[in-house]
Amino acid sequence: MARETITKVVVPVAGMGTRLLPATKSQPKEMLPVGRRPVVQYVVEELEEAGLKQILFITGRKKSAIEDHFDPDPELVSTLAAGGGYALLEELRYTETDARFFYTRQSVPKGLGDAVGHGREFVGDEHFVVALGDSIIKSPDGSSLLKIMIKAHLEHGAACTVAVERVAPDEVYRYGIVKPAAGQEDQENFDLEDVVEKPRPDTAPSNLAIAARYVFSPAIFEAIQRTAPDRQGELQLTDSIRLLIQLGHKVRAVCLRPGEQRYDIGNFESYFKAFIDFALADEKYGYLVRQYLKRKAREI
Ligand code: UTP
């Protein structure tokens, strides 16, 4: 079943985004701007860079803005062209892609595991990628972490390969945390013995947090089906990955490289940090933002 390449990806965007209220009362958090683009546009660009051309969004209520964003808009294009707005037309180039977008609804957001489970028919018997729609991976020189993950996943015959990043020990309670296999702790690419969702710092098996990107074999769907909901009634994807390990499947991790960063837009603190970093790195406005922030920093 292991294929030479992977082309399908599932992008869950159906969560309620309650931690970002009121900003997310009537719009998807995945559409919040980071610098000039909405979060989910960076995610799709990253997927295209990795050669992933069939993209299934797991959507929900109040998420139709995501579909509109990736849909070509001939009326807007002809209005801009008629007015000579060629620079602005460039900003719409991202809609001229050969990627194909598919949408299915998770009517009740019952957790990330449940959301991924909605991709079963689309995926069929192929290996596939899951990329969280609310998290940006910024890679050095625009190189692709997903390409590295896919290669490692297929070479090792894994059922699951997760991206991981080191987080501060007092932040492990926010993430799925992995336990590397004994003796492999210092490698960049290693087998997992266990994964734990949001552990207490004193019981966490490491400070390596799952970083919003996954590669799976279809075995994950069986594991999701067999996973019990947590206390909030949600199916946690981390629990399904744990089950894969317990069932004897090979589950691996690939570390983010030096200079590579995950931006999780799920809470205001990291959203603000992401916006500042992207604004500072902006080709056109970065200089002005730097001047402004320097001035502000002297005032505080
Ligand atoms: P989060 O874990 O941040 O959950 O989702 P959330 O429900 O969106 O946010 P809060 O906790 O209410 O603030 C991570 C990614 O998984 C998707 C989200 O849309 C986000 O992109 N997700 C989450 C789903 O698609 N379905 C779910 O049931 C939960």
Image (cartoon, rainbow, N blue to C red):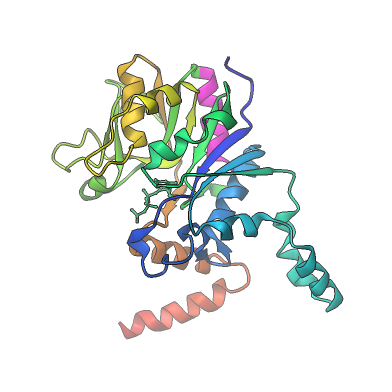
Q: Position of residue 103 (x, y in %)?
A: 59, 45
Q: Is residue 178 above or below residue 175?
A: above
Furthest toward the left, the residue is: 202
Q: Nearer the viewer, residue 278 or 228?
A: 228
Q: Position of residue 44 (x, y in %)?
A: 60, 48
Q: Is residue 247 above or below residue 198?
A: above
Q: Nearer the viewer, residue 11 or 153?
A: 11
Residue drawn at x 74%, y 71% as measured from the top left:
88
Q: Is residue 31 magenta?
A: no
Residue drawn at x 59%, y 46% as measured from the top left:
46
Q: Is residue 154 magenta?
A: yes
| Left or right relative to 117: residue 198 | left
Residue drawn at x 22%, y 33% as measured from the top left:
205
Query: Residues in magenta?
Result: 143-155
Q: Quadrant of the N terminus?
A: top right
Furthest toward the bottom, the residue is: 299
Main SS, magenta residues: helix
Q: Position of residue 293 (x, y in %)?
A: 43, 78
Q: Note whether residue 190 is visible.
A: no
Residue 50 occupies quadrant: top right
Q: Note whether residue 278 is visible.
A: yes
Residue 92 occupies quadrant: bottom right
Q: Quadrant of the C terminus?
A: bottom left
Q: Position of residue 229 (x, y in %)?
A: 28, 35
Residue drawn at x 64%, y 20% as measured from the top left:
4
| Left or right relative to 218: residue 211 | left
Q: Is residue 53 above or below residue 140?
A: above
Furthest toward the right, the residue is: 82
Q: Count the marks: how many? A: 0
Q: Nearer the viewer, residue 89 or 142?
A: 89
| Left or right relative to 62: residue 297 | left
